């Protein structure tokens, strides 16, 4: 890693330690020149798939694996992550180079894949600290440009025609995440129930399809150390073929969330002073990159994004309470799901 990189590393917890000797033996067979014996540390933060930095004489790599314990159906799909970053290699969407997928649970305990480490900066929040306002503006616009480029990818030509079902994506996602929520819920939440009911009856007739990321935000991209642009998009676990505006709604969701109540919200901040472009500006920038005639309407998709994130956070809370989360802050962070559902419901009622 370079001195400018800002990603936090530490020793894995007891539940997330891996057998580095077995890992080294496996990687020697699958990565040319891999030596082994180097340091393996875990990236801290994040709630889904445990992620590790491997520093080797042959290069620096990142390993992502499924978490231990009983998992929800179709969750933590590291094999899908590996497939999509392999397919996007050489496209207009910057991704790390995929190295190897291991489906043998006996190596480190769960399925995993290895990709090249990409130097750069990752920011967990939306304010991009220690960056000047002009740099922040350029970074957000770069994110909008990359998202538009992603949605412009010919996914069939990229070998991803069977990566998801293009029709009725939002309808299927509402059903899926409602089931995921019910499978992980620990308490009743009236706002979640009302949002689910509203979404089920308010889906727009527009049924476009593209490759979608599913969790597109500053924390899942790497910015160059010396320039305000995206050099890699990370965490493709939720990617599929679906409606592009689902990604846009998720990307813009922070504008509707109070910064005082949500760590990823920016409502109430001095956006101009920080350098964060307006929501309208990002819609315009996205539309230009995606080849659209005009900026899209996104309120429905912002509500959908909040609902889906709330369902994910409910799962984070459940894993935290069960002791299987990859981050010790899981319980605290997961409890935000009910507040998020309440905001989503307020927007839905004004649509």
Image (cartoon, helix red, strand yellow):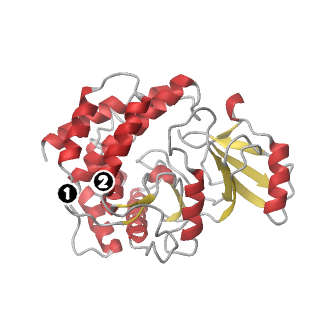
Tag count in the figure? 2
Q: Secondary structure at mark 2?
A: helix
Q: Report whether 177 appears left or right of 30.
A: left
Q: Can see residue 276?
A: no
Residue 282 placed where, x, y %?
A: 30, 62
The part of the image, by quadrant, that contains residue 187 is: top left
Residue drawn at x 67%, y 54% is 113
Q: Report whether 327 appears left or right of 15.
A: left
Residue 323 placed where, x, y %?
A: 58, 25
Q: Secondary structure at mark 1?
A: loop
Q: CA distance from mark 1 to mark 2?
A: 9 Å
Q: Residue furthest left?
A: 350
Residue 204 has which mark? 1
Q: Report whether 18 appears left or right of 286.
A: right
The part of the image, by quadrant, that contains residue 17 is: top right
Residue drawn at x 56%, y 56% is 81
Q: Are marks 1 and 2 in contact (CB under 8 Å)?
A: yes
Residue 204 placed where, x, y %?
A: 19, 57
Q: Report whether 281 appears left or right of 46.
A: left
Whether residue 112 is situated above or below residue 120 in the rendered picture: above
Q: Quadrant of the N terminus?
A: bottom right
Q: Which residue is mark 2?
A: 170
Comparing 132 with 262, the one in front is 262
Residue drawn at x 73%, y 49% is 104
């Amino acid at each position: 890693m370079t001195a400018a990189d800002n990603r936090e590393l530490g020793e894995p917890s007891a539940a997330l330690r891996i057998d580095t000797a077995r890992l080294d033996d496996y990687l020697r067979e699958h990565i040319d020149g891999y030596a082994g014996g180097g340091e393996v540390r875990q990236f801290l933060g994040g709630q889904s798939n445990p992620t590790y930095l491997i520093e080797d004489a042959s290069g620096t790599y990142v390993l992502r694996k499924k978490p231990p314990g009983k998992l929800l159906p179709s969750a933590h799909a590291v094999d899908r992550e590996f497939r999509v970053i392999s397919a996007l290699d050489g496209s207009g969407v910057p991704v790390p180079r995929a190295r190897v997928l291991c489906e043998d649970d006996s190596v480190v305990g769960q399925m995993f894949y290895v990709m090249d480490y990409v130097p750069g900066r990752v920011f967990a929040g939306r304010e991009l600290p220690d960056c000047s306002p002009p740099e922040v503006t350029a970074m957000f616009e770069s994110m909008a440009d990359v998202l538009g480029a992603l949605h412009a990818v010919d996914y069939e030509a990229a070998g991803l025609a069977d990566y998801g079902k293009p029709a009725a994506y939002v309808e299927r996602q509402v059903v899926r995440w409602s089931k995921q929520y019910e499978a992980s819920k620990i308490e009743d939440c009236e706002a979640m129930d009302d949002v689910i009911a509203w979404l089920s009856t308010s889906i727009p007739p527009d049924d476009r399809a593209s490759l979608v990321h599913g969790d597109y935000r500053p924390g899942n991209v790497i910015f160059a150390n010396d320039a305000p642009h995206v050099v890699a998009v990370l965490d493709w676990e939720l990617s599929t073929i679906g409606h592009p505006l689902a990604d846009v709604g998720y990307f813009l969701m922070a504008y509707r969330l109070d910064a005082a109540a949500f760590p990823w919200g920016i409502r109430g901040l001095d956006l101009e002073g920080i350098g964060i472009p307006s929501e309208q500006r990002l819609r315009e920038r996205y539309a230009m990159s995606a080849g659209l005639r005009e900026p899209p309407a996104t309120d429905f998709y912002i509500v959908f994004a909040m609902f889906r994130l709330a369902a994910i956070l409910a799962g984070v809370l459940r894993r935290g309470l069960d002791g299987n989360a990859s981050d010790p802050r899981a319980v605290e962070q997961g409890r935000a799901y009910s507040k998020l559902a309440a905001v989503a419901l307020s927007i839905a009622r004004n649509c």
